[in-house]
Image (cartoon, rainbow, N blue to C red):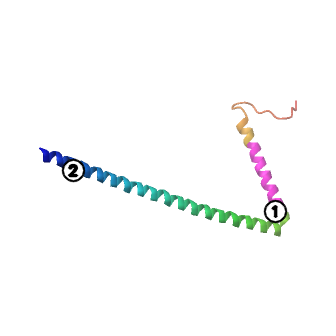
Amino acid sequence: MESTMGNRIADAVRYATECSNDARRISTMAQDAVQERLNEASRTLKVMQRRMQDAEHTARYYVRREPLKAIGVTAGAALTVGLAVGWLATRVFSAPGARRQTRFAWR
């Protein structure tokens, strides 16, 4: 009877040790995966920063080379954005089913 109890205790200790080792291994794998993703994100951020610097350099060069065209492109973009925002604002902020009223009454 005593050896059976001793065997059970030894089995429980071995099982606990295996579980502890498994937990450590899983924890290490998770830490490695997180670190790998952080490194990947850092590399991606550096690439994006380089691309933004290149785009900024290209834009500066273009503006210095063709200033009037740059002003025209900027004005066109601003006009387009303004028209789009105005159009969306009338759609979003008007009551559904309500009849649209114009600013001028022609009657």
Say what secondary structure mark 2 lies in: helix
Crowding at dot 2, Cα within 10 Å, few <14 / some 14-19 / many 20+, comes out as: few
Mark 1 or mark 2, earlier in chain? 2
Among the 4 quarters of the image, the one containing residue 96? top right
Q: Which mark is residue 70?
A: 1
Chief secondary structure of the magenta portion: helix
Query: Is 42 rendered above or below residue 79?
Result: below
Q: Decide whether residue 70 is among the magenta residues.
A: yes
In the image, which is nearer the foreground, mark 1 or mark 2?
A: 2
- Residue 45 sits above or below residue 65 on the image: above
Does the magenta segment cover residue 32? Answer: no
**Residue tagged by mark 2?**
10
Which residue occupies 71% across, 65% down?
55
What type is the residue that disc 1 sits on? Answer: Ala
Left or right of 73: which side holds 52? Answer: left
Residue name at image x 38 percent, y 55 percent: 24
- 82 or 6, which lies in front? 6
Compared with 73, 94 (above or below) is above
- The residue type indicated by label 2 comes to Ala
